[in-house]
Image: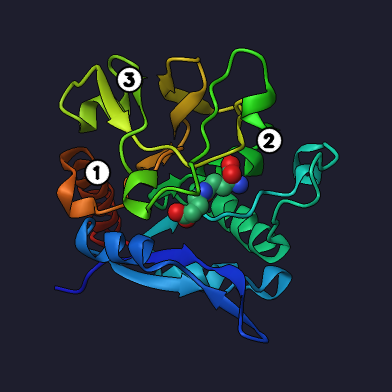
Amino acid sequence: MRRPIVLVPACSHEIGPHPSYAAQNKYVDAVAVGARCQPLLVPPLGDSTDIESLLSVANGIMLTGAASNVQARLYGQETLDPSLPQDIARDATALPLVRAALLRGIPLLAICRGFQEVNVALGGTLHQSVHTVSGYFDHREDKTQSLEQQYGPAHRIKLEPGGLLAHILDGAGEIQVNSLHGQGIDRLAPGLQVEARSDDGLIEAYSVAASSAFALAVQWHPEWRVEENHDSMRMFSAFGLACRVHRDRIP
Ligand SMILES: N[C@@H](CCC(=O)NCCCC(=O)O)C(=O)O
């Protein structure tokens, strides 16, 4: 039987002197291996994106992490540190795509930048620099470490009892997660429901309460070595199952 199609919005990158569209292997592979779906990369064409055509073939959407920040003007702020990378083309593509996908009940899994994007797309705001806000930990990775260390467990999160994530993780009360982000959620958008927090109170996972389909977003990186982590496999499997249900729905 055909695999469900999962849209993966790509990022803008320079490959040598050439502007390019790209997605990291680990995200794309996790859709294929963890969710057992067919990834379909979406170039960040902004207003030239035919959202209706994409959604007519999509059974899911997975938003990747990326080093770039969502533009602060999209949540009504000035950019505090313009030296940090942005990806205007991805913002202009992913945010409208997310809004349209949620309206259509298309399953969604959002990771790190994707987690921040969905919150902004639905009217929430971000802390532009979590580690400078009183009371919060520094959630950034140590870039002098090996990738293995950077994506290793960094801190625990506590799951909301009775929530979607706790359900997916067999009723777990807490899990260990990695952490590679400088920004984080300040005001959660209307209609989003907290699923987990770190010990400093920062929101680490939420679901879209109003969505008729599976819609989960996490600040950490379950795509990293997905097959080696039971929690990550459960999350991708649950997403894949929701995509199958969407594929098999009566039109
Ligand atoms: N702007 C965000 C980006 C966080 C994020 O997605 N990091 C992952 C980068 C590398 C990867 O894709 O694994 C922030 O810093 O908060």
Q: Describe residue 111's horizontal placement relative to residue 44 as left or right.
A: left
Question: How far apart are the alpha carbons under marks 2 and 3?
Answer: 24 Å
Residue depth check, mark 2 versus mark 1: number of the one nearer the observer: 1
Task: Report the amino acid beneath label 1.
Answer: Ser
Residue 199's disc is: none
State which quadrant residue 92 falls in: bottom right
On screen, residue 212 above or below 19: above
Task: Report the amino acid beneath label 3.
Answer: Leu
Q: Describe residue 100's horizontal placement relative to residue 180 as left or right.
A: right
On screen, residue 184 above or below 16: above
Q: Are marks 1 and 3 in contact (CB under 8 Å)?
A: no
Whole-percent x and y of residue 243?
29, 55
Residue placed at 21% from the left, 38% from the top?
231
The earlier-in-sequence mark between 2 and 1 is 2
Whole-percent x and y of residue 234?
19, 42
The earlier-in-sequence mark between 2 and 3 is 2
Near mark 2 (Cα within 10 A), the count class, few <14, some 14-19 or many ≥20, is some
Residue 232's disc is: 1
Residue 123's disc is: 2
Residue designated by label 3: 159
Q: Describe residue 76's horizontal placement relative to residue 141 as left or right.
A: right
Question: How far apart are the alpha carbons under marks 1 and 3?
Answer: 14 Å
Whole-percent x and y of residue 165?
30, 29
Question: How far apart are the alpha carbons under marks 2 and 1?
Answer: 28 Å
